[in-house]
Image (cartoon, grey):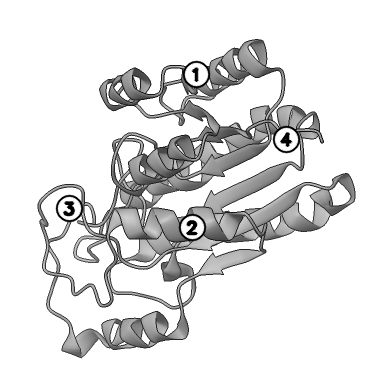
Amino acid sequence: MSITPPRRIWLTGAGVGIGAAIAEVLLRNGMQLAASARSVEPLRALGKRYPEQLLLVPGNLIDSQQVREIGERITRAWGALDTLILNAGTCEYVDTQPFDASIIERLARTNLLASSYCIDVALPLLRSGHQPHLVGIASSATFLPLPQAEAHGASKAGMRDLFESLRIDLADEGIAVTLVSPGFIDPPRPQRNNLPMPLRWSAEKSAEHICEKLKQRPLEIAFPALFMSGLWPLTQRDQQPQPTVGKRRAHTTNHDKGQS
């Protein structure tokens, strides 16, 4: 009986929060992991514990040249890729007085454009992989509008549309595409705003849930309707405490930025 080799996975935003928790689950389950983050120190700590499984590929993913160099390192090390998990991202609040369009530009670059750079270099590797799988961590903010989430929601909605279109175009090649829409996740750092976070999960619990569901290669991994019902009051502006403008969401993580 042939033994299936461990999957070769590239995970972005692996330094902190849910990304670090996903990395831990994958490595504990014996996967080969190429881990990206802007800061190399958390990756080195993982490398000391999983030296035979971890490939360190740090870099700033909004720099297309750095992303190409990461792709070249993965190619030299493995020659192919089985799974890409695009987890790196960030979140910032938008204030309408004054409205600052640079926040939307910054989040579009980090959450959407950087993802497209990674997909660009990963697709040739996935085409050479085993049961190739493209995974994107989106956001529950794409299901309904939230206060001061104009930049985050718009960038993640763009990511959703990108992945859903890719699912259609890659189907004939046998590349599965999964969107993950997590709920609120415990912050990796002390909370710096007063935005309510109903039904919040720990990064570890979220990572276990996501990694288990990914084995089935579903179209989407989304939190249940109970979570969505908890979000609904947040859309009612007159009932909301005002979050601290300009601060990243407390539950955000990864790529030393954030991921809801």
> Which amino acid type corresponds to the residue marked 3 in the rendered image?
Lys
Distance between mark 2 and mark 1 Cα atoms: 28 Å
Q: Nearer the viewer, mark 3 or mark 4?
A: 4
Which numbered disc flags the more N-terminal residue, 2 or 4?
Answer: 4
Give the residue at mark 4: 4
Which numbered disc flags the more N-terminal residue, 1 or 3?
Answer: 1
**Mark 2 surroundings: few (<14), some (14-19) or many (≥20) residues within 10 A:** some
Secondary structure found at label 4: loop
> Which amino acid type corresponds to the residue marked 1 in the rendered image?
Gln
> Which amino acid type corresponds to the residue marked 4 in the rendered image?
Thr
Distance between mark 3 and mark 2 Cα atoms: 27 Å
Distance between mark 3 and mark 4 Cα atoms: 45 Å
> Which amino acid type corresponds to the residue marked 2 in the rendered image?
Ile
Q: What is the tally of numbered marks visible in this picture?
A: 4
Label of residue 66 in the image: 1
Label of residue 163 in the image: none
Q: Are circles 3 and 2 on residues that touch, CB within 8 Å?
A: no
Secondary structure found at label 2: helix
Q: Are circles 2 and 1 on residues that touch, CB within 8 Å?
A: no
**Mark 3 surroundings: few (<14), some (14-19) or many (≥20) residues within 10 A:** few
Q: Are circles 3 and 4 on residues that touch, CB within 8 Å?
A: no
Residue 158 visible from this viewpoint: no
Q: Are circles 1 and 4 on residues that touch, CB within 8 Å?
A: no
Give the residue at mark 3: 247
